[in-house]
Image (cartoon, grey):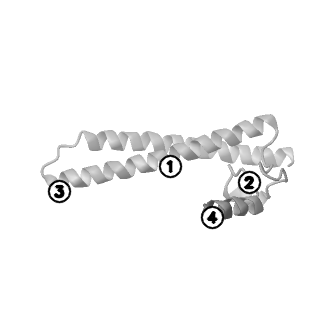
């Protein structure tokens, strides 16, 4: 992968990282707000509880993606970004545009998914 392509993806990763961090911060504020809500009756309590569970699930997913982005940025630093961790071939530019923190090329990803579905 050429240097300008790596820089392009690094910038995308950093921008997504900033977005996620902002979303996580907003989610934490929302959870705190929900926790401090005065609940009038059981229906209100159920609604607040459901909203809190949704916010926590979203926050968990964002944290997972943030970890994957940090891992990809580490690969940028050591010069292995864009290389499939299974077959060691280049991951296509188009795949990286869709999922900048991809660890596997499309073919290897399909193999992983198929073997996971068999178990």
Cα separation between marks 1 and 4: 25 Å
The residue at 27%/41% (across/down) is 35
> Does residue 73 appear to the left or right of 36 in the view shown?
right
Image coordinates of residue 48 in percent, x first then y, are 26, 50
The image shows residue 105, relative to residue 71, as above or below, that is: below
Residue ID for mark 3: 43
Sequence order check, earlier mark of 4 and 2: 2
Sequence order check, earlier mark of 3 and 1: 3
Q: Secondary structure at mark 3?
A: helix
The residue at 84%/50% (across/down) is 88
Q: Residues within 10 Å of mark 3 (few under 14, many from 20)?
A: few
Q: How many discs appear?
A: 4
CB contact under 8 Å: marks 2 and 1: no
Sequence order check, earlier mark of 1 and 4: 1
Residue ID for mark 1: 61
Residue ID for mark 4: 118
Image coordinates of residue 87 in percent, x first then y, are 82, 53
Q: Nearer the viewer, mark 4 or mark 2?
A: 4
Sequence order check, earlier mark of 2 and 1: 1
């Amino acid at each position: 992968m050429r240097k300008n392509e790596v820089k392009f993806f690094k910038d995308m990763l950093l921008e997504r990282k900033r977005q996620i961090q902002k979303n996580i911060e907003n989610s934490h504020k929302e959870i705190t707000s929900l926790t401090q809500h005065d609940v009038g009756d059981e229906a209100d309590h159920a609604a607040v509880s459901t909203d809190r569970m949704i916010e926590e699930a979203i926050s968990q997913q964002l944290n997972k993606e943030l970890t994957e982005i940090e891992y990809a940025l580490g690969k940028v630093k050591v010069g292995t970004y864009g290389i499939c961790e299974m077959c060691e071939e280049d991951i296509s530019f188009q795949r990286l545009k869709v999922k900048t923190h991809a660890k596997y090329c499309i073919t290897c990803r399909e193999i992983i998914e198929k073997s996971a579905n068999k178990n």
